[in-house]
Amino acid sequence: MHLGEEMCFRAAKYLVTRRDKTIQRTFEPSVDHSRRVAGANPATFDRAAYKNWRQSELTRQFDQNFTRESVRGKRVLDFGCGRGELSMYMATLGVASIDGVDLTESDISSARMLAQDEKLPVAPTFAVGSSDAIPFPDGKFDLILCFDVLEHVMSIEVIIKEWRRILAKGGRIYIWWQPYFHPYGHHLTAYIPLPWAHVLFSPKTIGVACKRIFDMPDYVPRYWDLDEHGNKKNKVFTGTRDMGGVNCLTIAKFERLCKQNDLRIVKRLGHHLSGQALVETVSAIGTRLPFLREFLTAIMIYEIETR
């Protein structure tokens, strides 16, 4: 066992054991989970609870950062729509049309069934896309929504070109995004609630630590850790990119890609980290500095316009 692997495991074990002994598994939509210990969101223990949390979270992300008036009469694409929670919310805000696209066929099937059960002013439609193409014609949309999904877009260079293609002239993109160097940008907080673990340790080291944490009797499994019978899956852990499903996209690279594709950033807002007063103060300052903002920004909000 390498020293780094042992250090990562022992630090994660201490935090996981302390967290999971006192964890609350009751999801309350009105509670702000952003200040909880990393990986302690109670919605992650139940698929239905997670769905409810996802719905309330996406609605909050939009309402806190954009206006309902800005989507009225627009042809909207919900990019990375999942089960269509944000799409169905858009359908109540006076959009001209709302389409959702995602890579996962099971999610698209769920979105279609959910939309059929809802009595919405505008009927959403959903399509399965691919990692390198969005199945819509040129200039079809006035607005693209990309909420809580940008870090999972593996072919980011290709997809940004696709966004440019399917947007009408003067079309816009609204983005809510957690950049890669966020303290928990590895997306593995259930197993490794260590800030900047993906900066401090190699993917192999993190993979070994995740496996050891997952196999501990004290580890409380999340709903994605269990099979249909409620038993722990036989999971394989290889590294942050594969396990967390993240593309390692930085703020600097994303803004460079926008410029290369003739997309103008109209609005840019970096949210600081939550925590103790000192953490929030340092983070708030860091979000304004070119290098530090990569590591001290919790969330980036963008409004982008085609030229």
Image (cartoon, rainbow, N blue to C red):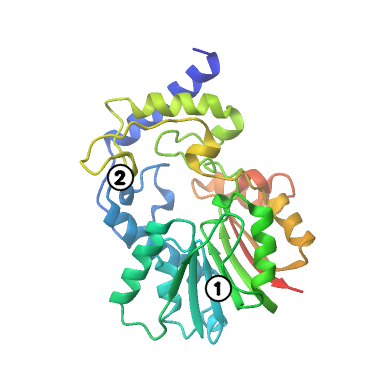
Q: Which amino acid type is shown beneath numbered disc 2?
A: Tyr
Mark 1 packing: few (<14 Cα in 10 Å), some, or many (20+)? Answer: some
Q: Earlier in the sequence, mark 1 or mark 2?
A: 1
Residue at the location (39% across, 46% down)?
36
Residues at discs 1 and 2 in contact (Cβ within 8 Å): no
The residue located at (49%, 41%) in the rendering is: 244
Query: In the rendered picture of this protein, how many numbered marks are placed on residues?
Result: 2
Q: Nearer the viewer, residue 154 or 94?
A: 154
The residues tagged by marks 1 and 2 sit, at their Cα atoms, a distance apart of 32 Å
Name the quadrant of the C terminus. bottom right
**Mark 1, residue position:** 66
Q: Nearer the viewer, residue 131 or 292?
A: 131
Say which residue appears at 43% left-offset and 49% top-offset: 35
* SS for callout 1: loop
- Residue 172 rendering spot, x and y as whole percentages: 65, 74
At 33% across and 29% down in the image, what residue appears? 17
In this image, 283 relative to 64: left or right?
Answer: right
Residue 275 x %, y %: 49, 47
Circle 2: element type: helix
Question: Identity of the amino acid at label 1?
Answer: Phe
